[in-house]
Amino acid sequence: MVKQCATSSMGEEVSAVTHVRSRLDEHRDHHQHQHQHQHAERDRLALDLFRRAADADGTERRQLIAEVVLLHLGLAEAIARRYYGRSLENDDILQVAHLGLVNAARRFDPELGRDFVSFAVPTIAGEIKRHFRDHGWAVRPPRRVQELQSALSAATAEVTQSNGATPTAADLAGHLGVEAADVREAQASYECFTVASIDYRVDDGETSLADTIGDDDTAYERSEAMVALAPACRELGERDRRILYLRFFRGWTQAEIGRDLGVTQMQVSRLLAGILRRLRARIGALESA
């Protein structure tokens, strides 16, 4: 009896799941059919507008083209969203996409037999890519790197489809007829679109990027000065070396040095001036040699 109840309950659950799936499939098919119908209606209206625009001129033609643009704003926004989150503001990318849509509408010729969407998509995408090429670099690489970086996207898709695996730099180099080192350089240029904040936390999560950036090391200048001064100082007399030591290493005033040597502050000033003059002359002679 229990077994029969369990089997009956399981059968009801399976039936319910099957019913839900059937309703979901019906809803999906209805949505797809509705979506296709909307696209077909949009294409029909666009073609009619283009044919009327071909026979019009001036203000009337501009208004008809504007109506075509309004019909396809969603298309431009969909293409623009592919490029969001990069180095440019999303609003700027959308504006460029709209510009590409306007250009496509102005240049489209319905007599060539193509539908407008298949013509507009590459036109809009190309406009956005050109805008990135001209304005999207935080650090602008050489033009040859920019052009190769642009070609890598299409080449990667083609080689991936052909080989069934993600291509290596050597694969892409062979496909494009360039050196593998050039491919790696172009791939690295993707980092030129954005820059990291100096407050960005590196791998350990505690150290900021600013803490890892080197600064001017004054010790190098001190070392160079000591190397240059050492032979010149050795040529000085004992009293002159003591004056330099007390003034520049101990930080004594000229009056304190004078009391130590038993001379006046004025004499110490003259002695210091003479010592420094001889050192400059000696260092100049060493550098010229």
Image: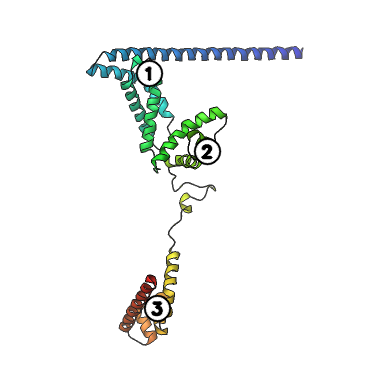
Relative to residue 155, is residue 283 drawn left or right? left
Q: Which residue is mark 2?
A: 169
**Element under disc 1:** helix
Query: Looking at numbered disc 2 in the image, what kind of residue is underneath it?
Result: Ala
Looking at the picture, tell me which residue is in the foreground, 143 or 33: 143
Q: Residues within 10 Å of mark 3 (few under 14, many from 20)?
A: some
Q: Nearer the viewer, mark 2 or mark 1?
A: 2
Q: Which residue is mark 3?
A: 244
Distance, label 2 to label 1, CA atoms, is 37 Å
Residue 210 seen by the camera: yes
Note whether 274 is above or below 97 in the view shown.
Answer: below
- Of pointers 1 and 3, the one earlier in the residue sequence: 1
Looking at the picture, tell me which residue is in the foreground, 36 or 173: 173
* Quarter of the rendering containing residue 69: top left
Q: Quadrant of the N terminus?
A: top right
- Of pointers 2 and 3, the one earlier in the residue sequence: 2
Distance, label 1 to label 3, CA atoms, is 86 Å
| Residue at (38, 29) in percent of width and height | 126
Q: Which residue is mark 1?
A: 116
- The picture places residue 99, in percent across and down from the top left corner, at 33, 27
Note whether 278 is above or below 203 in the view shown.
Answer: below
